[in-house]
Image (tube, rainbow, N blue to C red):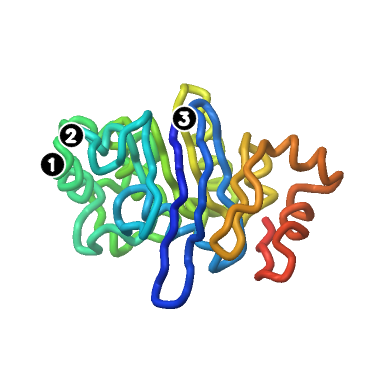
Amino acid sequence: MITVTGLTKHYGDRIAVDDLGFDLAAGRVTGFVGPNGAGKSTTMRMMVGLTRPDRGEVRYDGIRYGDLQHPARMVGSVLDARCMHPGRTARNHLRASAALSGIPARRVDEVLADVGLESVADDKAGGFSLGMRQRLALATALLGDPRVLLLDEPSNGLDPDGIRWMRHHLRAFADAGGTVFVSSHLIAELARFADDLVVVGGGRLIAAETVDSLTARTGQSLEDSLLEMTAGAAEFASA
């Protein structure tokens, strides 16, 4: 169980995240949705210690992220698909990441195969398409065989086959008992595999419920429901 409690972050006079709280359960895919500027990326950065909250905390099975003995074995995150050095090969990028996290080097070839990059393992990341970089970033997150995946817009740059691959991969991860927390603007696609939703607007929680309960309550499609809930904010992009 991941528990987010009272997360708050200011940038000068602007409130990016305002007293945000929700829970994430194992074996579930939770979509994190809201218009641009809603505070999604800031929230996810606070969840893995890259941004310090002004108030609030995040606990993984009762433990703060900074107190986890082996963070990479609990949480794998993709917050920026451009997180690799363009001059390094995919294999060397993963080897360096594994060494930094105390992960056995044998995991490198395993995750390359898992994300379908074994044929380009010795190519430089700078020549990769955005979709290939998304796959390499996911491979980096999977290195520690984590129990949790936190992914910020992981479908960006993927073609339809790649989007289907990502959907099936994340669904399988959750079905095996993992926790998936994924932000996305592709609402129609997200509706195909998410169990739960956390909806935010202006840094505040709008709703935290199952996809089925939200659509049953509103009597609309998921996309129409979310657009109505965040009326007045930037529009969602549809799949």
Q: Which residue is mark 1?
A: 99
Q: Is residue 193 above or below residue 187?
A: above
- Amino acid type, label 3: Phe
- Amino acid type, label 1: Ala
Under circle 3, the secondary element is: helix
How crowded is the residue under tag 3: few (<14 C-alpha within 10 Å), some, or many (20+)? many
| Residues at marks 2 and 3 touching, judged by CB atoms closer than 8 Å | no
Q: Which mark is residue 173?
A: 3
How crowded is the residue under tag 2: few (<14 C-alpha within 10 Å), some, or many (20+)? some
Front residue of this view, candidates 36 and 169: 36
Under circle 1, the secondary element is: helix
Q: Earlier in the sequence, mark 3 or mark 1?
A: 1
Front residue of this view, candidates 220 and 200: 200
**Residue furthest toward the right?**
219
Q: Position of residue 32 (x, y in %)?
A: 56, 49
Q: Which residue is mark 2?
A: 103
Q: What residue is rendered at 45% in x and 59% in y?
A: 41
Q: CA distance from mark 3 to mark 1?
A: 24 Å
Q: Is residue 62 above or below residue 198?
A: above
| Residues at marks 2 and 1 touching, judged by CB atoms closer than 8 Å | yes
Q: Quadrant of the C terminus?
A: bottom right
Determine whether, in the image, residue 69 is placed left or right of residue 197: left
**Residue furthest toward the bottom?**
13
Q: Earlier in the sequence, mark 2 or mark 3?
A: 2
Q: CA distance from mark 2 to mark 1?
A: 6 Å
- Amino acid type, label 2: Ile
